[in-house]
Image (cartoon, rainbow, N blue to C red):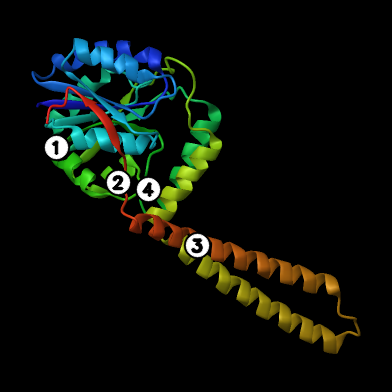
Amino acid sequence: MDMSVVIPVYGCKAALEELCERLTVTVSSLVKEYEIILVNDNCPQNSWEVIQKMCEKDKHIVGIELARNFGQIQAITAGLDYSSGDWVVVMDCDLQDRPEEIANLYHKAAEGDYDAVFARRKNRKDGFLKVLVSKIFYKVYSWASDGNYDPAICNFSISKRIVIDNYCRMRELHRAFVIYVKWLGFKQTAIDVEHDPRKEGKSSYDFKKRMKMAMSILTSQSDKLLKFTVGLGFFIMFCSVIAILAIIVQYFVKDVNPGWSSMIATVCLMGGLSIMCTGVVGIYVGNIFMQSKERPLYVVRTVLNDKK
């Protein structure tokens, strides 16, 4: 198999046929043997019916139906596990990632002997809040991981088999495709690509889901939050010592009555910080607990046109 294209499917049922048609034209012009892997992540629009029909018509299309909704990254992992191409493309199903850009990614990888080439969305066609949250997260994550991550870079990419095989070896519960591939190293680069509006509907990732995902990735990939709470504790202790010395000096220099307001404020502040620090530690312990179960990242219900 020369090339595999892995696509998680959730929403945008109307885009699937056009997506596969455009992919077939583009990929068949680059390589002889290819497969298009559509991973149905329990799409509420019943996209599996469309995938079944396309699999019957075209044996290059592989359909994978997950037993329930496991999430986009888990669906990508399932597709990567089943892929067998020397080159592997990862992209979304909503046609915001142009299938025609695969040729540019492929040629860039070939001419520079790169192991992975990412797409950088030049003019991102997403909402203001989504773009803002993405920028904030990657700023925080870059600080936490001592790395440098570009928020314009997305999952849309092409990678050699060796990169995908090593990515699939990592079975952490909390996952991120771009971050993991970056961590692996190898020879990587990114190129600017055009970014189109969604074919249908809107993204299922609302603000709450994005914040939850960001916290999961941050606490599973870095221990800087723990170090930050330790530093915060020392800083507050230092401020408290200064405040106590000031109160002692004030007591002997001025004839003032001690106030309840300052005491209550201090107690509330320290109590709140203690709870916050305990909560941060609890999140890390929770991550350890969930990972120690060693449950599968996904469960497959059906596979159509399985090439393995």
Binning the other alpha carbons within 10 Å of mark 4 as few (below 14), some (14 to 19) or many (20 upward) gives many
Q: Earlier in the sequence, mark 4 or mark 1?
A: 1
The type of residue carrying mark 4 is: His
| Residues tagged 1 and 2 counted as in contact (Cβ below 8 A) | no
The type of residue carrying mark 3 is: Gly
Q: CA distance from mark 4 to mark 1?
A: 23 Å
Q: CA distance from mark 1 to mark 2?
A: 22 Å
Per the image, the residue denoted by label 1 is 161
The type of residue carrying mark 2 is: Pro
- Please determine whether, in this image, residue 251 is positioned above or below residue 64: below
The quarter in which the N terminus is drawn is top left
Looking at the rendered image, the disc whose residue lies closer to the viewer, 2 or 4, is: 2
- Please determine whether, in this image, residue 130 is positioned above or below residue 55: below
Looking at the rendered image, the disc whose residue lies closer to the viewer, 4 or 1, is: 4
The answer to whether one can see residue 87 in this image is yes
Q: Earlier in the sequence, mark 1 or mark 2?
A: 1
Per the image, the residue denoted by label 2 is 296
Q: CA distance from mark 3 to mark 1?
A: 38 Å
- Please determine whether, in this image, residue 111 is positioned above or below residue 264: above
Looking at the rendered image, the disc whose residue lies closer to the viewer, 3 or 2, is: 2
Q: Earlier in the sequence, mark 3 or mark 2?
A: 3
The one of 282 and 163 positioned closer to us in this rendering: 282
x, y percentage for residue 249? 78, 86
Q: CA distance from mark 4 to mark 3?
A: 16 Å
